[in-house]
Image (spheres, rainbow, N blue to C red):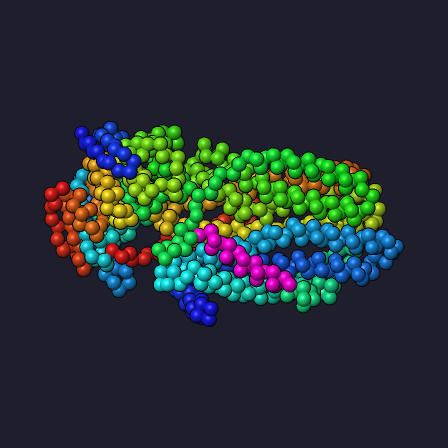
Amino acid sequence: MTTTIGLSTRLARARLRDARGAGVLDGFAVLAFAVTAWMAFVVTSGTWAFAQRRVAPPQSLAAFDTETVTLMTNTYVILAGIACALLIAPVLSLGGAAARLGARGRARRLAALRLVGMTGGQVVTMSVIESVVQAAVGLLVGAAAWALSLPLLAMLRFQGTTFSLAELVLPWYLWLGVAAVLLALAAASTALGLSRVRISPLGVARQQTTPRLRAWRVAALAVGVVAIVVGGRVITGSSGALIGGLVFVGLLGFGIAMVNLIAPWLLQVLARVGLRVGSPAWLLGNRRIAADPKAAWRNVSSLALTGAVVGMLCVIPLDSSVLAGVDELNLMLLTDIRTGAVVTLVIALIVGAASTALAQCSDVVDRADELVALDRIGVPRSLDAAARRHQVMVPLLSTLVLSMGLGVLAALPFTATFPQRFALGPSSLLVLAGSLVGATLLTVLAAEATRPLRARALSTQVRRND
Amino acid sequence: MVEVNASGSNGGMTITDTAPTRHRVDPLTADGLVKRYGQVVALGGVNVHIAPGESVAIMGPSGSGKSTLLHCLSGILPPDEGRVTLGAVELSALSDAHRSRLRLQRFGFVFQDGQLIGELPARENVALPLLLTGVPRGAALRQADDWLARLGLPGIGGRRPGELSGGQAQRVAIARALIHAPSVIFADEPTGALDQATGHEVMQILRATARMTGSTLVLVTHDLQVARWCERLIEIRDALVHSDTRTEA
């Protein structure tokens, strides 16, 4: 074990000193872990602040009676829980992708180590150690970013007043808990990622054949829609807001699971339909999606949240004319939901862009040999960039449309008590359009961020053993 | 008429001269080629003239410069000194983008491990050079199917490279290299990743199809048995042409 740790450390140092940029992937992994940690701390921090307010309600709620305040603060904890549920999965997924990126980048070296006699177990242990070290560095960077962003978070206004720093700062045990989860995730993701490649002394082989996804997933979607409709009736018919809220959280979780089930299959179908028309870049982009629709979905799954939030915003009234008949308490709740939704949206966009950039960078590194070979046979260098844009945009746009529709469905039961059952004012449309444009731009930029890596792969003139 | 009967793992096959329209085939010439990698001289002033339709094997020990010569001849690498011409076209004077276009339109490449695109089924891998030059999808795929059938691989067009054996993948790569009837086929250790029997079969196909299309064949190998499939053998040593002889092929 000591030997493995020592070798791991020496190799990591050598890689970081490598003038050809072998440390670039390590840098990307650390950066992704840092974003993961930053977002995880922000989300936990916000939820913790609402939990604090449940125990010690802010002065701004003093005008209301105790029962109302209790109901109100409980509702906010539930809403914060919903935001957590929406964000934790993609944040953890980003952390997992960072761990896998590190593992892929190390693949060839791992095969060489197997050749000189290291066992499969030692190789996996070494990779896990390296990932945990990267995650730890990312964790510290992310924690620093979180600490620096606390004043910004404190400017957010909920329950009629802004947060205090004391409300937002996590207790040490919660901080350590988040850190432990992130480090454990890094270790588990690396071990899992390596189980998907076979590292033999003669090289690394990816298990390529991905079985085609089957249509039974459509039946699951039908069941899910029925469950959401029935659940919606339970919410509107329930007397207690707490029970209604819990049912809603459950439904939301079920809805997310359902989307994860159906979305890869839908992407596969869309990609296969798209094969019949278009340019070679379109063909290649669609083939890449169809070959591994689950991976395509993973790249954009966090943006499904964006779509769902935007969909919900469309039916929650945002304009003062619509809110005219709403009492003070509900007005506060609606305003805060709107603020919370926008915050969730911003976090989802950041996580989505980071996920896409990371996945695309990983993909460029994985395909370096293929890129060089295609360049040699004279394939225009623009083909890969164009195929990559298609590969990202097809899942992105289809995901946003689907998730926005589901977001509208999920929010409809809440609007039943509003003076106007359905409202789509100018500010709603602005949020809708802004989110779509923002998500698209960020994702395209994330895909384009691979250009330097691709150029480096193509420009490296290594003298072959000729 | 060229006819080849090969008995491989996929049974016998017959290649006839019913190939698509041939490109104009021009002589390929290198004059005073010099290529350096930092302080290392990979080519130290190489002169080679390859006639249209000729088959040439380039051999040499590790580090002698044989792959570098192939890369310079094919326009993958620009030489530091000297020039490469294909007919009236001076490759070494073209921009990177122009050299890429020339490679796509007039050259075909076969690499050691096929280098097929993993997500594309065999027929789309073969059709890629045609699709990239604007041939309609239906016509390109039909030609790809024809080539796969010619090379003894009927019915495997829908399989992805990961589902093919090494020999099958290399034949798919040969079909991709030949589908646009190139002037020159460049093969870099085309049998390096194959067992002897499959390598023999692949060379037989490569040689026969090059003859059929009238293409020039330039291959790099370290295996004398493979080199003997060509009419001419150039040996590179210490970055220079050491010998240039005719074989009995």
Q: Is residue B46 visible?
A: no
Q: Is residue A391 above or below residue B235?
A: above
Toward which corner of the image does residue A167 lie, by quadrant? bottom right
State left or right for residue B30 relative to residue A314: left
Q: Position of residue B221 (x, y in %)?
A: 22, 50
Q: Position of residue A252 (x, y in %)?
A: 68, 45
Q: Position of residue B94 (x, y in %)?
A: 28, 47
Q: Is residue B210 above or below residue A37?
A: above
State left or right for residue A129 relative to residue A434: left
Quadrant housing the C terminus of chain A:
bottom left
- Residue positioned 36% across, 37% down in the render: B122
Q: Is residue B138 above or below residue A371?
A: above
- Residue positioned 28% across, 47% down in the render: B194
Q: Position of residue A417 (x, y in %)?
A: 80, 40
Q: Is residue B155 visible?
A: yes
The question of residue B145 being in magenta is answered with no
- Residue positioned 25% across, 32% down in the render: B13
State left or right for residue B142 relative to residue A396: left
Toward which corner of the image does residue A437 lie, by quadrant? top right
Which portion, as a residue range, is magenta? A177-197
Q: Nearer the viewer, residue A308 or A1?
A: A1
Number of numbered labels in the structure image: 0
The question of residue A181 being in magenta is answered with yes
Q: Assign the magenta stretch its main secondary structure.
A: helix
- Residue positioned 77% across, 45% down in the render: A244
